[in-house]
Image (cartoon, rainbow, N blue to C red):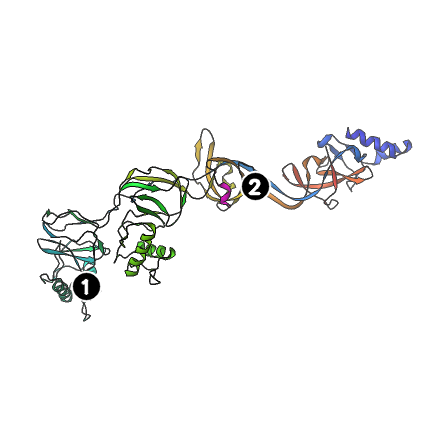
């Protein structure tokens, strides 16, 4: 059809007696629709065409072309392991008897026993509290072999002020100076100053002991290993309030309340596994103090962030406890804090107002607090995405939202439904875009290739040349067109990148 139009136009321009010569020396043009073939012998690769008013045109544009792969995705939240009240069955710490006998005295419940003090007595013989990592397991006297436990003892005696003359060497060697320091401690406590410590007469603990409960009675008989004192307890009872499903909780937010005692979330990698009170030392104390300051409880400016639970810590903790309606005792019991490493979203709840919780009760199933797009990346496209890549998520309402790849699975998953694929996760750059959406199907667009700031025309504007390459037919005005040879580049979205010094933005090219 187009060949017929071109022939008609030539007949109109040339007399009959010149037609034979023209056909003999000019180019021969054969056009078969959009996929036509031109045989050009003229080096400028141009020709005159038929009246442009009979053709359809498209504009030459300067644009960016992108080759996009679209994958299926699911927008939602990734659930984690259930949160268990008080963390684990190891949460409650016990002081057990080190020797057999009859309990003759016990500390008051709620009291704190520090280093160098008597915790309880058996057959009227005291158990002395000392700080250290190695447990008490043998007699310590002048016949004792060197050891780390001796070094712990020397350090404790030095802290307690029983080395005024500087004779006590911190070397793990039990000397007469060590014996004399023990005798001075025993004398101050009003007990027999033997200068030796027998098994069951002393304990090494990490920090001051908060007496949460007594597990034996005065007058009862104990044997080695029997529990005597619980140093931490887990509040248990009826749930009176709890966070709602879908709530996003961060550091120092309330998870739930047990009989008016709130359980607070701490976002930290440091475990809270014990009761914290005056004299406690450790990384958990440091996190607590930093949190109290952040919340505005700094004991009048006296609270300093370090790992020692001091008087200022007690004052600040009392202020926080009043503000949240917790028992105001200046002590942080296990179970009052639950720990996660990141903020959480409550995906499901396993308790309700009126139900009972105790040690080991599963309370919530958390999920990530940020929306995550789960993508199945076909195994054949394994190298298409890496962590940090940008993708575009087409939301259910058609909006396009940028997202960043946060993880790419390294193990291929085989599925009858989806074939072999790798799990990929991406996080929306603008989290507010996912409000109210969970398990929502989305399209994920991935740019395979990009040509920036190039001239482009519809692919159908290309005319294949018999000798190779392509041309486009350009409107030159006056109802005429001419062929311009081009170099084709990237193809994308029904368009093609073209290069030619004879083309510029705004020119019109013929399209079928």
Q: Front-most of 284 and 312?
A: 312
* Horizontal side, residue 499 vs residue 433: left or right: right
Residue that mark 1 sits on: 157
Q: Mark 1 Cα within 10 Å, few/some/many (few <14, many 20+)?
A: many
Q: Is mark 1 on a helix, strand or loop?
A: helix
Q: What stretch is highlighted in magenta?
A: 429-436
Q: Mark 2 Cα within 10 Å, few/some/many (few <14, many 20+)?
A: few
**Mark sitting on residue 183:** none
Looking at the image, can residue 150 be seen?
Answer: yes
Quadrant of the rendering where the N terminus is positioned:
top right
Q: Front-most of 86 and 332?
A: 332
Q: Front-most of 243 and 36?
A: 243
* Residue 501 drawn in magenta: no
18 over 506 or under it: above or below: above
483 over 114 or under it: above or below: above
Quadrant of the image occupied by residue 89: top left
Quadrant of the image occupied by residue 157: bottom left
Task: Identify the residue at the far bottom of this view.
Answer: 165
Residue that mark 2 sits on: 448
Whole-percent x and y of residue 423? 45, 38
Whole-percent x and y of residue 60? 71, 42
Disc 2/disc 1 C-alpha distance (Å): 70 Å
Q: Is mark 2 on a helix, strand or loop?
A: strand
Whole-percent x and y of residue 179? 13, 64
* Residue 430 drawn in magenta: yes
Count of marks, rendered view: 2
């Amino acid at each position: 059809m187009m060949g017929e139009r071109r022939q008609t136009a030539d007949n109109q321009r040339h007399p009959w007696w010149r037609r034979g010569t023209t056909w003999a020396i000019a180019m021969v043009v054969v056009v078969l629709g959009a996929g036509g073939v031109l045989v050009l012998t003229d080096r400028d690769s141009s020709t005159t065409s038929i009246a442009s008013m009979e053709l359809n045109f498209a504009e030459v544009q300067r644009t960016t072309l992108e080759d996009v792969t679209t994958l299926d995705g699911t927008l939602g939240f990734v659930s984690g392991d259930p949160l268990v009240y008080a963390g684990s069955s190891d949460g409650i710490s016990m002081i057990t008897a080190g020797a057999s006998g009859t309990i003759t005295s016990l500390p008051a419940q709620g009291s704190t026993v520090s280093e160098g003090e008597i915790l309880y007595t058996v057959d009227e013989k005291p158990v002395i509290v000392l700080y250290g990592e190695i447990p008490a397991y043998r007699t310590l006297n002048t016949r004792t072999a060197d050891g780390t436990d001796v070094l712990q003892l020397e350090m404790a005696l030095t802290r307690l002020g029983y080395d005024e003359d500087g004779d006590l060497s911190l070397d793990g060697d039990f000397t007469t100076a060590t014996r004399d320091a023990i005798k001075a401690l025993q004398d101050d406590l009003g007990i027999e100053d033997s200068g030796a410590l027998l098994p069951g007469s002393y304990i090494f603990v990490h920090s001051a002991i908060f007496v949460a409960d007594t597990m034996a009675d005065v007058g009862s008989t104990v044997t080695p290993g029997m529990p005597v004192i619980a140093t931490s307890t887990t509040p248990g009872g009826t749930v009176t309030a709890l966070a709602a499903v879908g709530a996003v909780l961060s550091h120092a937010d309330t998870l739930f309340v047990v009989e008016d005692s709130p359980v607070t979330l701490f976002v930290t990698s440091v475990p809270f596994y014990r009761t914290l009170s005056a004299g406690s030392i450790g990384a958990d104390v440091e996190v607590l103090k930093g949190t109290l300051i952040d919340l505005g409880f700094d004991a009048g400016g006296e609270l300093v962030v370090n790992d020692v639970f001091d008087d200022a810590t007690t004052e600040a903790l009392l202020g926080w406890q009043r503000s949240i309606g917790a028992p105001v005792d200046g002590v942080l019991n296990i179970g009052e804090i639950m720990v996660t490493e990141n903020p959480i979203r409550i995906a499901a709840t396993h308790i309700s107002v009126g139900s009972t919780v105790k040690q080991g009760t599963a309370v919530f199933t958390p999920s990530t607090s940020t929306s995550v797009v789960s993508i199945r990346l076909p195994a054949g496209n394994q190298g298409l995405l890496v962590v940090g890549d940008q993708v575009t998520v087409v939301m259910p309402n058609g909006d396009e939202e940028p997202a960043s790849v946060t993880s790419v699975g390294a193990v291929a998953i085989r599925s009858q439904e989806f074939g072999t694929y790798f799990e990929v996760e991406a996080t929306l750059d603008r989290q507010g875009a996912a409000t109210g959406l969970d398990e929502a199907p989305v399209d994920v667009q991935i740019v395979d290739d990009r040509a920036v700031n190039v001239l482009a025309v519809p692919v159908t504007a290309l005319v294949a040349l018999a000798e190779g390459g392509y041309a486009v037919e350009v409107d030159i005005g006056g109802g005429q067109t001419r062929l311009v040879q081009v170099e084709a580049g990237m193809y994308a979205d029904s368009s093609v990148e073209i290069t030619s010094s004879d083309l510029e933005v705004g020119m019109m090219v013929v399209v079928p």
